[in-house]
Image: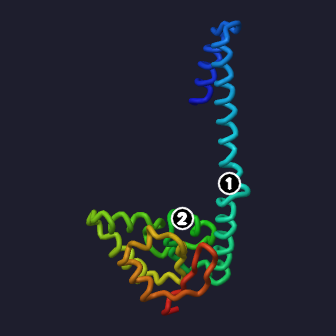
Amino acid sequence: MVTPVLSVLVGLALSKIDWQLTFDKVILSLLIVNFSGSFVFSLKQPYNFFFGEASKDFQEKMLVAEYVKTNTTEKDKIIAYVYGSTFYYLTDRRPGVRYVSASHPLLDYRENFGFQFNQKFIEDAEKNQPKYLIVANFDKLYSTNYELMDYFNQHYFLEKAFTNYSVFKRYSL
């Protein structure tokens, strides 16, 4: 909605310019450079999506998901202790805990909100016994939730390491 309005306003402003003046030509040149620069910089996001880091990350997520899918049944549950719920969708496996994103228990733990999300997370994990745990290898933020990290270390072992993600399997299974 903003772009059409901005285009109309720029067009109206350009129609009022006396093109014989040098100052007006400088302003027009600056506007053209600005719009051209904005267009070029806006191409960075699609490039990243198709060829850059986002593409590489998604390809690796597909490999991790395929590994988990191959080694589980549709009834098995998993924990993806990462931001968002992408792995649940890609693996077509249900979460073994009520929080599909690691950010919920982390915020409660870090900010001391008192909602006891870690306790609920652990209770759900004990009840559902998720077969696999997926974590991001270089995500220092989520690893600051020491309570859950201790739980993971006690109940899961590393089964498969990828470049940016690791898959842990529950000891009891």
Q: Is residue 122 left or right of residue 20?
A: left
Q: Which mark is residue 99?
A: none
Q: Specify the amino acid type for callout 2.
A: Ser
Q: Specify the amino acid type for callout 1.
A: Asn
Quadrant of the rendered image containing residue 30: top right
Q: Residues within 10 Å of mark 2 (few under 14, many from 20)?
A: some
Q: Is residue 167 above or below residue 14?
A: below
Seen from the viewer's position, the closer of residues 80 and 40 is 40
Q: Which mark is residue 85?
A: 2
List x then y, in percent, for residue 156.
49, 87
Query: Between tags 1 and 2, which lies in front?
Result: 1
Quadrant of the rendered image containing residue 123: bottom left
Q: Secondary structure at mark 1?
A: helix
Whether residues under marks 1 and 2 lie with C-beta atoms below 8 angstroms apart, the answer is: no
List x then y, in percent, for residue 94.
54, 72
Residue ID for mark 1:
48
Tell me the residue at 65%/59% (across/down).
54
Tell me the residue at 68%/54% (across/down).
48
Q: Sequence-wise, which precedes: disc 1 or disc 2?
A: 1
Q: How many marks?
A: 2
Q: Secondary structure at mark 2?
A: loop
Q: Which quarter of the image is occupied by the N terminus? A: top right
Q: Is residue 143 left or right of residue 119?
A: right
List x then y, in percent, for residue 173.
52, 91
Q: Residues within 10 Å of mark 1 (few under 14, many from 20)?
A: few
Q: Is residue 82 above or below residue 157?
A: above
